[in-house]
Amino acid sequence: MPGNLPPSTIAGKPVNPIGYGMMNLTALGTVSHEDAIKSLKAAVDNGANFWNGGLFYGPPDANSLVLLNNYFTQYPEDATKVVLSVKGAYNYATLTPNCTPEGIRASVDEALRQLDGTHPIDLFECARIDPNVPVEDMVKTLAELIKEGKIGSYGLSEVNANTIRRAHAVHRCAGVEVEISLFSRHALEKGGIVDTCHELGIPIIGYGVLDRGWLSGQFKTLEDIPKNDPRHHFPRFQPGNFEQNMKLAEFIQGIAKKKGVTPAHVAIAWVKQHGVLTIPGATKASRVKENTQEVELTDSEMGEIQEALDKFEVAGFRYPELFAAGLSQ
C-alpha cells in the first residue's frame, strides 16, 4: 500500500481527505436549486470541507459561484468551515483557455463579483494550460493576484509533470488537480504527476474518482443510462467498450460486497490511499453522505485490486477526442 497520505492542508487551511466536486450541481442544469443546496449542506455537515467549483460550470447566472453565493448567504456560519477552489480563465463554449494577464484577471474579478464577499477564493486554478502563454508567465500573474489579496493561492489543472515543475519554480503551487480513478491511472506513471507532486510537497486533488459513474454501481447496461445523457459521447460508454469496462466495474462491486461497503467506497479509498484528496461530485445529499464515509483498504485488498487492474484492460480514452488537446499539458 502506498505510504503517502492525502494532504491535511490546502493553501494553509485544514482539509479533510474527501472533498466535494461541484460541477454536476450546475453544469447541465438538471439539478434543482433546492437539491443543490441540500447537497452542499450534506457535504459540509459530513466533513467534505474542500469544495471545487468553476466559473464555467453552468451559465453565468447559474454557475458554481452563483450557487455558492446563495448557499453562504443562507448558511453564513459555514463559510469558515469551507476551503474553496475556483476554476476559471476558460471558455467552455469554445474549449479555449485564456491565460493572458488580462484573461486571468478578468476571470478572478468576475469570480469575486459573483461571490460578492460571501467567501474568499482560497485556491484559483486556470482550468487548462493556454498554448499561447508560457506557464511561467501565467504563474507570474497568479502570484501578483496572491500578493494583491484577490486569491489565497493558485493551483494547476490537467497538467503534466514538466509543467508542474516549471510552474512551481516560479511560485509555490498549492495544489494540482488531475483526473484519477481505477479507470484513469495515467497520473500514477513512474516519475509522473503523482510522483512529482509528492516530491515537491504539492497537494494532489483528484477528480473523476468514480469515472462518471462507472465505479458507483449505478448501471449494468447502456440502457441504464438515459438517452440524452452526455456520457454517451464518452469513448468508455460506447458499445463494445462498455461491455469490456463492466468487467472491472463488476470486480470492484465484488470487493465492495465482501467488505460490506459500496463500490464507491472502494473506488474513493483506492484513490485516497495514493495520497490524493478526492473530490467526488454526487448530486444527491444521500450520495454525498455515502461518499464521505471513510473506508480503508487493506494491503491484501489493494493487492487483489492490482491483480484485477493488470487483468482487465480499460477500453476507451477518458474524454471525447474534442477535449483531448487540452489534457495533461
Image (tube, helix red, strand yellow):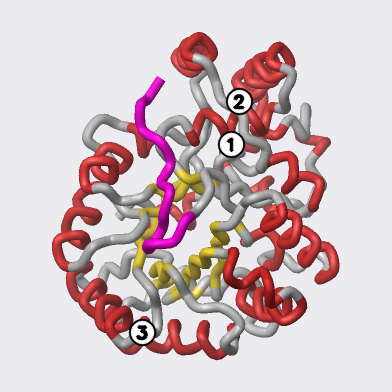
Tag 2 secondary structure: helix
Which residue type carries mark 1? Arg
Q: Is residue 314 above or below residue 259?
A: below
Q: Is residue 64 above or below residue 284?
A: below
Tag 3 secondary structure: loop
The part of the chain drawn in magenta is 1-14
* Mark 1 surroundings within 10 Å by alpha-carbon count, few (fewer than 14), some (14 through 19), many (20 or more): many
Look at the image and tell me in which quarter the C terminus lies: bottom left
Cβ–Cβ below 8 Å for labels 1 and 2?
yes
Which residue type carries mark 3? Gly
Q: Is residue 273 above or below residue 34?
A: above
Residue 98 sits in quarter? bottom left
Mark whose residue sits in front, 2 or 3: 3
Left or right, 164 with reference to 183: left
Left or right, 208 with reference to 215: left
Q: Is residue 5 magenta?
A: yes
Residue 118 x, y percent position in the rendering:
61, 82
Residue 187 sits in quarter? top left
Q: Which residue is mark 2?
A: 245
The disc at residue 236 is 1
Residue 48 x, y percent position in the rendering:
62, 52
Q: Earlier in the sequence, mark 1 or mark 2?
A: 1
Residue 270 x, y percent position in the rendering:
52, 28
Instruction: Work out whether residue 142 can be spotted.
Output: yes
